[in-house]
Amino acid sequence: MCGFSADWLALREPVDAAARNRELTTRLCDWRRKQGALSVLDLGSGTGANCRFLAPLLGGDQYWRLVDQDPALLAVIDPIQDRSGLLRRETTTLDLAGSWERLEMPPANLVTASALLDLVSTDWLARLARRCQSWRAAVFIALSYDGTICWEPALAGDDQVRDWINRHQRTDKGFGPALGPDAAPALAARLEERGYSVALRPSPWLLGSEHAPLQHALLTGWVAAVREIAPEPADELAAWAEQRQRLIDQGRARLAVGHWDLFAAFTS
């Protein structure tokens, strides 16, 4: 399974928070008010950004199980200020590409993840939907990449590079062939088949000159990804990347990266 650095997760966390779909966050909070004690399973937790964002909004008695394959990321999770004493957390190191369904914990009534879904395969999504249904758990999945990359000002080569990136998104990330941009709609369909009411809403990153470090990191990562699957256009790719780098350095670059947020729950 692919991994991510703590520096990268810290760079994207405030942008993720700003991008989250407010309508679905409100729906989740409305659902939570009808619940008692909350048991949350957070998959691919990294340094705990999803818990940091959601736990203060959800309030009340909460138990979170944060699961990630990288113990170094889990080890740097900051404490959440909780004066009520009702928030409890536990971390578990586990390769999610394996049989995570065997994780020993009480049935969760909320399953969450952020920036995970586009890495996984069709079979993995089917297993996730099946386990959530067996628990009758609500599902809140944020920031799944949707295939949209739009730079301003536009350059020749933007569309080709985006297409290569999206091809790379569908390669195996450790879970089998990844669904990439198709993951969130695919999970929505599987949950609907299992009786869920599902809402899927956009949560795009909108990056301006103040986000230059994140733009730099994305550009570097995308160029490396393209070279893995399309090494032959090296000169054209290098020229495109040099132009993009110059625009970012000049503070002229704007970038929109599309994502989906998903909330699903049983209506009865």
Image (cartoon, rainbow, N blue to C red):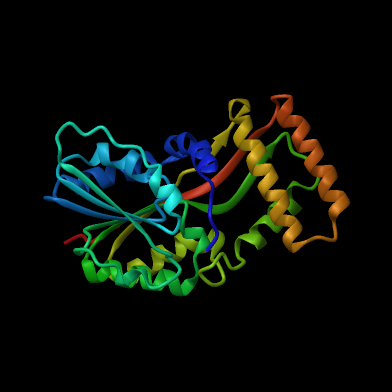
Image point (62%, 66%), residue name: 171
Visible residue check, residue 171: yes
**Residue that appears at 64% across and 58% down:** 166
Question: In the displayed structure, does residue 160 sit left or right of residue 179?
Answer: right
Write the residue at 59% across / 30% down: 211
What residue lies at 54% left-to-right and 72% top-to-bottom? 176
- Horizontal side, residue 204 vs residue 163: left or right: left
In percent of width and height, residue 35 lies at: 14, 51
Q: Is residue 201 in view from this perspective?
A: no
* Residue 131: image location, x then y, percent: 30, 70
Circle count? 0
| Residue in front for this viewpoint, 104 or 263 | 104
Q: Position of residue 191 (x, y in %)?
A: 34, 67
Q: Tell which of 32 and 176 is nearer to you.
A: 176
Give the answer, above or below, for where 190 lies relative to 40. below
The answer to which quarter of the image holds residue 22 is top left
Q: Residue furthest right?
A: 235
In-front residue for pair 139/77: 77
Q: Nearer the viewer, residue 68 or 72?
A: 72
Say left or right for 48 vs 28.
right
Q: Quadrant of the C terminus?
A: bottom left
